[in-house]
Amino acid sequence: MIHPAPDHQIRQLLEGPFPVVRLPGIEIAQADCLAVMRGLPDCCADLIVTSPPYNIGKEYEHRRTLDDYLAWCREWLRELHRIARPSASFWLNLGYCEVAQRGRAVPLPYLMWDLSPFYLLQEVVWHYGAGVASRLAFSPRNEKFLWFVKDADSYTFNLDAVRDPDVKYPKQKKNGKLKCNPLGKNPGDVWYFPKVTSGANRASPERTAHPAQFPLAVIDRIVKACSNPGDLVFDPFMGSGTTAEAASANDRTVAGSEMRADYVKIARDRLMRAIRRRESERSQLHLVLGE
Ligand SMILES: C[S@@+](CC[C@H](N)C(=O)[O-])C[C@H]1O[C@@H](n2cnc3c(N)ncnc32)[C@H](O)[C@@H]1O
């Protein structure tokens, strides 16, 4: 049974001279992430999930020198550390960027892993199968998620909520006891999730007009594993609102920022559709159960 997220925990969290989209348990400010975060109290977010601009000239960024880019990253990473609760996790999705004279596709984790006081717990490889084809090198098929925590000895991790039921020998026993957890195996640190695709006849059902959308399933796993119902999830680079949709579907509250008005509208429309869909599923369930 899905319960609505507790609104009182989030009401008017994002305060400032900027427009805010407010839906049940969701707040997205159309503003620069630093301006938004500077208005937030210390230690308010239980989980942070995000993917920043990679400084590769996408439509939503202006290219900077590498030094400028990393200096900017350091600023928002430090703000994120300030607003993270002591038990919080921070999941940072990063791809590649060119470093003049040094590397054509340098993994951004090599440049960014140590720019904030967060503790790096693990690197997870997101393998996405198909993608652009390369002739001069191997075709790129992965990005990374860096999983940081604030306290290396105490953080939320709900492994049972994300176990992989695809076990080869589920009935195998040792000394009369099942070898594998009946809920499934630990999903490991290489995750296969297809990218959100576009194009006639091949677009993913969740596709929006945003050019760099996370697959919902990846964020769903992170939200389930690293937060609990009612927790506050934050995404400073909200884009099309994937983090908000995954968090809200799992009864977490969610806040974030997105600079572009057109993307905020995409996120708002998408989130309203998701809320309506869940409400209709809930009322059908009530009908079936005769409540
Ligand atoms: C990689 S995309 C995030 C996509 C998102 N994960 C999704 O699933 O749709 C990065 C986003 O950050 C936004 N952005 C860039 N600079 C920003 C800033 N200073 N403050 C807030 N948002 C910013 C861009 O407009 C873009 O939508």
Image (spheres, rainbow, N blue to C red):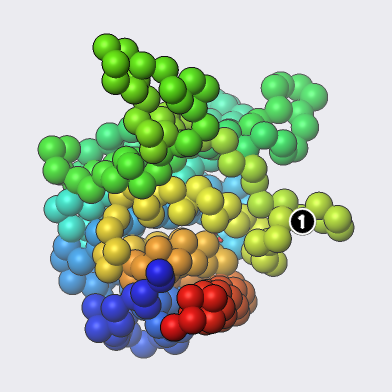
Q: Residue at x 33, y 42 (%)?
A: 160
Quarter of the picture containing the N terminus is: bottom left
* Snapshot quadrant of residue 121: top left
Q: Which amino acid lies under the numbered mark 1 shown in the image of this protein? A: Ala
Residue 114 in the image, given as x and y percentages of width and height: 29, 37
Q: Nearer the viewer, residue 138 or 206?
A: 206
Q: Position of residue 283 (x, y in %)?
A: 52, 81
Visible residue check, residue 70: no
The residue at the point 60 percent across, 47 percent down is 56
In the rendered structure, the answer to whether residue 168 lies left or right of residue 222 reads: right
Can you name the residue that lies furthest to the top here?
Answer: 175
Camera-side residue of 220 and 175: 175
Q: Position of residue 39 (x, y in %)?
A: 25, 76
How would you rate the neighbour count of disc 1 (Cα within 10 Å): few for under 14, some for 14-19, many for 20 or more? Answer: few
Q: Quadrant of residue 104?
A: top right
Residue located beneath label 1 in the image: 203
- The number of discs equals 1
Mark 1 residue element = loop
